[in-house]
Image: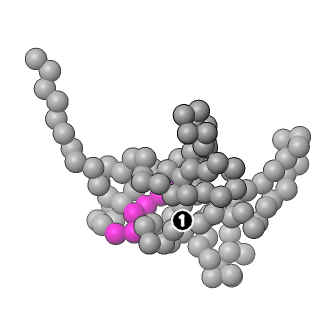
Amino acid sequence: MEHLRKQGKPEQAIMHAVSADMQTWTKLPEQTFFAPTDKYEKGRLARSICFLESPKTSEYNMLVAARHKEGIPRRRGLTALCSSKDLVKWQVREPFYAPASTARTSVLIS
């Protein structure tokens, strides 16, 4: 992603492409999505992407590996949750899974 670096943008991004035949793809660079730098490490959003459609909310959800901006470096990993109604404009929600920021509980079964 050297072209992004030359523009002063993070190297990792989620990019949008479309295809009519699933063989030839057209990139839509104007729809490139970057991690919000107030929450996440710069450039740390774009790995292990998974899309899910939510029938309850009529939204698409995207799960993405990311990293918190602050905290112990080895404990910042999380699964970010982004939502969209149109697959173009995305909103970052609270993390889907963030083990370093959730309380650990124990369950006893008797």
Query: The N terminus lies in which quarter of the figure?
Result: bottom right
Q: Is residue 23 visible?
A: no
Q: Residue at x 44, y 72 (%)?
A: 38
Q: How is the image coloured?
A: one colour
Up/down of 105 relative to 6, above or below = above
Q: Main secondary structure of the magenta part?
A: strand
Q: Residue at x 51, y 68 (%)?
A: 36
Magenta stretch in the rendered image: 64-70
Residue 63: image location, x then y, percent = 53, 47
In the picture, measured across the screen, residue 109 lies left or right of residue 87, that is left
In the picture, measured across the screen, residue 27 lies left or right of residue 50, that is right
Residue 13: image location, x then y, percent = 62, 63
Q: Residue at x 78, y 54 (%)?
A: 17
**Amino acid type, residue under disc 1 in the picture:** Ala
Quarter residue 41 falls in: bottom left
Residue 32: image location, x then y, percent = 69, 64
* Furthest-left residue in this view: 110
Q: Residue at x 89, y 40 (%)?
A: 21
Quarter residue 14 falls in: bottom right
Residue to which mark 1 is pinned: 35
Up/down of 49 relative to 27, above or below = above
* Furthest-front residue in this view: 57
Q: Residues within 10 Å of mark 1 (few under 14, many from 20)?
A: many
In the picture, measured across the screen, residue 54 lies left or right of residue 31, that is left
Residue 70: image location, x then y, percent = 34, 69
* 17 is within the stretch colored magenta: no
* Furthest-top residue in this view: 110
Up/down of 74 relative to 51, above or below = below
Quarter residue 35 falls in: bottom right
How many marks are shown on the rendered structure? Answer: 1
- Judge by depth and name the residue closer to the eye, 46 or 2: 46
Q: Is residue 56 visible?
A: yes
